[in-house]
């Protein structure tokens, strides 16, 4: 009993020390932003003379974003909603994301610093001992070595996928199962080039969805894009590297992603995204063989009127070798990772160009043997009401 009390006292002290450290780190971060603004403002010749940001240099922009939600689903297995990077809580009014972004852009130098708060960073960014990183969405600086090309280094949002972490820029607040397992953020150095129709990026990264490196290896990233006109855009993305943490046998992962964006009519937008992953020594019934994963979704947004849009999404996820999901026992006595499909429908109201209100419903069904939801069911229904504004 005395030993237990002693451990409890030490844990309390450690928690208090951690909170103090966190507070200092956050304060230093905001102080750094203030200093950067002051230095850039003092050194700039041209300044904005009117509006909210009067006195700011022309090269500097400050933007904000707030997104709130309430979500419901009939799956009570876990306190947080399964497969929900965005809107992870049920039956509560919550903040998905509140952020401020400071961006500097000139002919030869550019930089981004985005500070964030809310459920999205809390449950998707690094946890202990690097939980202070959850307040940093982006922090990078870049230099232009030539026309249309940049070299940037620091923290970035991922280049993978057809859906992102900021709800306003997606068709839906919920994200597809494939997107759920894609990386959200990355850290490293990136070279990018943008031409009239083609664009490309080459990256050297700490790894797949890591900021602080988890092993002594680095991963390589690639993006190749083609946009011949305003009605079509195709992008191939890749990350290749050993993503196993130190102390675990290395396994090379080759993650491929293809995104197609169509704008066939003035009121219709279509996105199709597919992921195909290979990882050595990962086949579920042969530990020496290559395992694989496949996922895809197709979504559309139809602007029925100036302020009202209708959305629809279908999705498929097949992780038979359990690269990203837990192996489950099937009725034929074999094991399999998650296999599922889903459909989502929604309506969005945009009172202004920089704000929205969104209501959506989603249905997910897993393989008949994979009863992972409440009361041993293989289906889940959910509803999300959300709204956001960018300023």
Image (cartoon, rainbow, N blue to C red):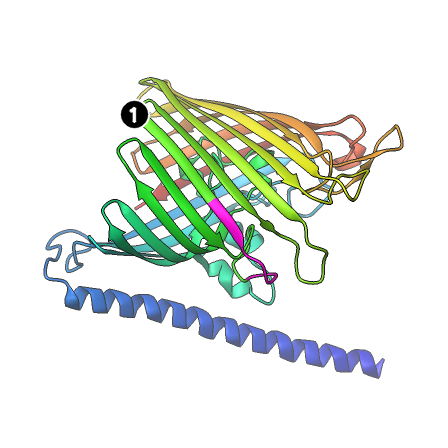
Point out residue 209 in the picture as x, y percentages from the top left corner.
55, 51
Residue drawn at x 78%, y 25% is 368
Identify the image quadrant of the N terminus.
bottom right
The image shows residue 66, relative to residue 176, as above or below, that is below
In which quadrant of the rendered view does residue 380 lie? Answer: top right
Q: How many marks?
A: 1
Magenta segment, prevailing SS (helix, strand or loop)? loop
Bounds of the magenta segment: 213-221
Q: Nearer the viewer, residue 184 or 97?
A: 184
State left or right for residue 55 relative to residue 218: left
Q: Nearer the viewer, residue 324 or 6?
A: 324
Residue 345 in sight here: no
Q: Could you tell me which residue is drawn at 37 percent across and 40 percent down? A: 200
Toward the viewer: 9 or 294?
Answer: 294
Looking at the image, residue 36 sits to the left or right of residue 239; the answer is: left
78 on left or right of 390: right
Q: Position of residue 116 (x, y in %)?
A: 43, 55
Q: Is residue 34 magenta-colored? A: no
Quarter-of-image position of residue 250:
bottom right
Q: Residue at x 59, y 63 (%)?
A: 216
Question: As drawn, is 219 to the left or to the right of 102?
Answer: right
Image coordinates of residue 135 in percent, x first then y, are 46, 60
Instruction: Residue 322 in the image: state x and y as whole percent.
Output: 73, 40
Residue extending farthest to the right is: 333
Query: Quick one: SS at disc 1?
Result: loop
Asked if residue 224 is positioned above or below residue 309 in the image, the reply reads below
Residue located 43% across and 44% down the image = 67
The residue wearing badge 1 is 230
Residue 316 visible in rendering: yes
Q: How packed is label 1: few (under 14 Cα within 10 Å), some, or many (20 or more)? A: few
Residue 218 counted in the magenta span: yes
């Amino acid at each position: 009993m005395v030993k237990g009390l002693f451990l409890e006292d030490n844990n309390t002290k450690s928690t208090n020390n951690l909170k103090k450290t966190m507070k200092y780190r956050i304060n230093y971060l905001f102080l750094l932003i203030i200093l950067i603004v002051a230095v850039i403002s003092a050194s700039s010749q041209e300044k904005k003379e009117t509006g909210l940001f009067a006195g700011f240099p022309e090269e500097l922009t400050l933007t904000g974003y707030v997104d709130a939600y309430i979500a419901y689903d009939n799956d009570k297995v876990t306190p947080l909603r399964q497969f929900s990077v965005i809107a992870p809580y049920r039956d509560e009014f919550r903040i998905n994301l509140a952020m401020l972004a400071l961006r500097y852009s000139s002919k030869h130098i550019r930089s981004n610093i985005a500070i964030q708060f809310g459920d999205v960073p809390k449950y998707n960014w690094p946890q202990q001992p690097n939980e202070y990183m959850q307040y940093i969405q982006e922090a990078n600086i870049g230099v232009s070595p030539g026309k249309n090309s940049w070299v940037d280094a620091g923290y970035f949002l991922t280049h993978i996928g057809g859906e992102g972490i900021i709800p306003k820029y997606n068709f839906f607040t919920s994200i597809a199962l494939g997107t759920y397992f894609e990386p959200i953020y990355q850290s490293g150095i990136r070279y990018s080039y943008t031409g009239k129709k083609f664009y490309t990026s080459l990256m050297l990264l700490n790894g797949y969805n890591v900021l602080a490196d988890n092993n002594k290896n680095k991963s390589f990233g690639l993006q190749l894009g083609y946009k011949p006109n305003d009605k079509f855009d195709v992008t191939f993305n890749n990350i290749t590297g050993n993503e196993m943490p130190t102390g675990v046998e290395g396994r090379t992962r080759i993650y491929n992603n293809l995104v197609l964006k169509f704008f066939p009519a003035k009121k219709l937008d279509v996105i199709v995204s597919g992921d195909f992953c290979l990882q050595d020594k990962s086949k579920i019934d042969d530990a020496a063989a290559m395992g694989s994963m496949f996922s895809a979704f197709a979504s559309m947004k139809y602007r029925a009127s100036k302020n009202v849009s209708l959305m629809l999404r279908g999705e498929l996820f097949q992780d038979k070798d359990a690269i990203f999901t837990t192996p489950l026992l099937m009725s034929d006595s074999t094991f399999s990772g998650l296999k599922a499909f889903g459909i989502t429908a929604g309506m969005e109201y945009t009172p202004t160009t920089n704000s929205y209100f969104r209501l959506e419903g989603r249905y997910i069904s897993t393989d008949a043997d994979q009863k992972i939801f409440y009361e041993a069911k293989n289906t889940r229904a959910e509803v999300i009401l959300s709204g956001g504004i960018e300023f």
